[in-house]
Image (spheres, coloured by chain):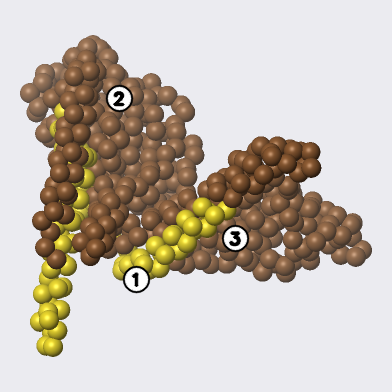
Chain colours: A brown, B yellow
Amino acid sequence: MKKYILIGFLAVMGTLAFSSHNALAFSITTPASYVQPDTIFLDQNGNLEIQWHKIQLGLFGYDLPGGIMVSINGTSTDPELSYNGPYAGWSAGGHVLTHGGVGTGGPCAPGFGSAYSGASEGTYGNTYGPISTVWDANSNSFVSTVGITEATPIYLTLFYYNGYTCGVSESLPNSTDYSQTFYVNSVEEPVQPEFLQPFDGAVIGQFPKWDFYLSNNSTSTQDGIVTVHFGTGPGNLSLTASTTYSGLPAGTDTELTIPQTYQFSTPQGPSSSVWYADIEVANSSTGFDITGSVITFTVSNNAPAFAPFPNGMFNFGGGETSSTAADCQYTTSSFLDDPVGNIEEAGCNMFIPNSSEQNDLYDSFHGTWDNLSTRVPFGYASIITTAFTNFQEGTNTSTLITTTTYAAFSSVLDPLKAGISFLLILMLGFWIFYFIQHIDL
Amino acid sequence: MIVYWLLKIFIYLLELITAPLLLLPVASLSVNLTGTLTQAGNYLALFDLFLPIPELFIVFGIIVSIEAGYFTYKAARWIYNKIPGIN
């Protein structure tokens, strides 16, 4: 018995150690002339990852190797993330992006030069990152990607260099004229707010507290300040109430409240009035500052201080709202009209969790799981798997073989990989079986 | 209802059993080391064309975890048996 308990424990711990994180993705909608990125990821550890599906190189008909300089340009209020000058990183070893991966040490670094297939245009699907740092030309050093927001321009600079030092014709000019800047159009922040009381469209009396969820989507605890802005119009949210939060648990929704002391209505005023509010989260752990969408609610003298959610709606937090569609719907008639259907429905409800219960179980289990997966020593495995995400997501990058060639061989390579995977798992099964048979406790 | 509460109790028990582990600090590595790992991942991605690298790592990790756990258990047992008066 002891043997099986130990094996079970080890299996759980082993699986836990290799649980991976989900990346937070956001899309870029505007295709560029020379680079068409699909998505830019900022994963839960603040690492930047860029995926694209098309890069055009070899302009002017030259058969040139090429690369991309990835940098970001901060605002004046964020000088540590600024990008200065088109040649930044050339001599200092900036991140040079090629089809085969990242070379550091300048344009002639290993792996550089294979982004171009020799025609006047190259089209590739590829991934860059995740990277935890980008080149900062001002400080001549790499700076953390933590702090990138939806307002941060991200520079993807295609450059075509004089290949003289790399063994290509010296007559070709250095050029970085084809830089493109992409603005992230949306971002899922590590911490997201959602109103609970009052909620959007609520009719409520003089309520004693602002009640809201903070969803921590990251894998670490978060600290910061949350402020409720409210007023009589969407452009007039001058009144505020705020509180701090610290140690916000990872991967869970936490309910917070702020005492509400403002007198919304007076006996001399109208019996009801419409108000607007939003929530600003200044998350000091990551530097993110997000303001949620504006809600509107009606304060009525005759309404209770707590507004019940409309029938048929449950609030699960985290920005999700789900209907209470019946999972066990056998009948809509009364018991006397359809006794069999009612009994069937009661039996079904007895044994099959409905949608809200399933969501609750899912959240509970993953809350526990996510909390554990960040702790020492399991958290180190999570960090490593996150760092290796680029090939976990099935991207095909190689200086040895182009994507086009890979596509041609995929009918052979994919089954080969599947076969090797199957053999590996089969061997692991045999090994565990042998281990249990011969274990000496 | 019944299945829901059975699973809920199971999750509560799981939380109770794993609660001591939450006392451990949150794992973090330096930016330089994370960057190095990322770069290593990019180089390893070359072999992902024809080898199932993630599966290799997972299988290797499971085996190492089991062996390390077994070794820890044996070491703890050995220390325990060294306590005078315990066989």
Residue A32 vs A48, above or below: the answer is above
Out of B49 and A296, give the one closest to the viewer: B49
Mark 1 neighbour class, 10 Å CA radius: few under 14, some 14 to 19, many 20 or more: few
Asked whether residue A384 is in view, the answer is: yes
Determine contact: label 2, label 3, CB under 8 Å: no
Q: Under tag 1, what secondary structure?
A: helix
Pair 3/1: label in front? 1
Asked if labels 3 and 1 share a chain, the reply is no
Residue at (35, 65) in percent of width and height: B18
| Residue with the mark numbered 2 | A125
Q: Position of residue A224 (x, y in %)?
A: 48, 63
Mark 3 neighbour class, 10 Å CA radius: few under 14, some 14 to 19, many 20 or more: some
Q: How many marks?
A: 3
Q: Quadrant of the C terminus of chain A?
A: bottom left
Q: Quadrant of the N terminus of chain A?
A: bottom left
Task: Tell me: A4 left or right of A334.
Answer: left
Asked whether residue B46 is in view, the answer is: no
Pair 1/2: label in front? 1
Q: Position of residue A162 (x, y in %)?
A: 16, 25
Q: Amino acid at mark 3?
A: Thr
Chain to which mark 1 belongs: B
Residue at (22, 18) in percent of width and height: A411
| Residue with the mark numbered 1 | B20
**Distance between the Cα atoms at labels 2 and 3?**
42 Å
Out of A194 and A358, give the one closest to the viewer: A358
Comes first in the chain, label 2 or label 3: 2
Name the quadrant containing residue A172.
top left
Q: Amino acid at mark 1?
A: Pro
